[in-house]
Amino acid sequence: MSTFVNAKRITTHVLRAMKENKEKIAMLTAYDYSLAKILDLSGIDVILVGDSASNVMAGHQTTLPITLDQMIYHAQSVVRAVERALIVVDLPFGSYQGDSKNALESAIRIMKESGAHAVKAEGGREIKESVERIISAGIPVMGHLGLTPQSIYKYGTYSVRAKEQEEAEKLKEDALLLEDIGCFAVVLEKIPASLSKEVTESLLIPTIGIGAGGQTDGQVLVLHDMLGITKGFNPRFLRRYLDLSTDISNAVIRYIEDVRACDFPNENEQY
Ligand code: KIV
């Protein structure tokens, strides 16, 4: 039985203790009040207000277009719903890479205007100064290494990262650097399982994997992917727990039929 299941509130310290206790951390994305409430009541440890909202909520091809204002809007909706989970919000593309002052201002806006508990930023040594400055203001930062979707145009593909020795070495160094400068956790996205195992064992802070094998301290999936709301995205790492797209479509088809047949509303469904 987990020691932390009954924790009233998940904090960054609880996550660290979970790693020490070898208890896995469950994280999912959410972007709105209703689904965030279900996740929280179901006992999820961490909710990521991911910039994947750009894809799954707004229909963009990449995570690049979403703005800081839009991220804050999604984060505010999630914060209103959640009593237990730790809420982490992605710093969107362009809000932290320019200079560290701009990064700090973006992180402060997220914390002040949404009431979330932490921010996440993609990258290693390239964003060291920004991460340091945010942490020095008392804002917890989750790192993100491996496949970093905000750099899609630099790499050109969403395929597995750090398969070659040189990139794997850089990733290991970046993970240690992020821990050294005070990140409380790091996401490892789409890298070989053997590499994420090595990184996980080398760090005191928890690693949260997506497409990074089973040896990380926790796992994260995009909610709309694991619920089967999104279609046509079938990476090997994705386990679909529902086929909600089909279920919703069937319900809508039945509703349309009922309306057209004058079967809805019936006598008990009116005043
Ligand atoms: O934006 C997002 O959903 C993410 C996860 C894939 C980790 O960054």
Image: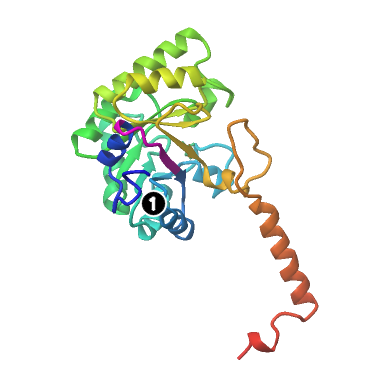
Q: Is residue 229 left or right of residue 218?
A: right
Residue 243, horizontal then vertical, whole percent: 66, 50
Q: Secondary structure at mark 1?
A: helix
Residue 39, horizontal then vertical, whole percent: 45, 53
Range covered by the magenta-colored residues: 20-27
Position above or below: 163 against 271: above
Residue 172, horizontal then vertical, whole percent: 38, 16
Is residue 114 shown to the viewer in this render? yes
Q: How is the image coloured?
A: rainbow
Residue 245 is one of the magenta-drawn residues? no
Of the residues shown, which amino acid type is indicated by label 1? Ala
Which residue is label 1 attached to? 75
Q: Is residue 91 left or right of residue 223?
A: left
Q: Residues within 10 Å of mark 1 (few under 14, many from 20)?
A: many
Is residue 105 shown to the viewer in this render? no
From the viewer's side, name the closer residue of 246 and 260.
246
Q: Hey, which residue is sitting farthest right in the picture?
A: 261
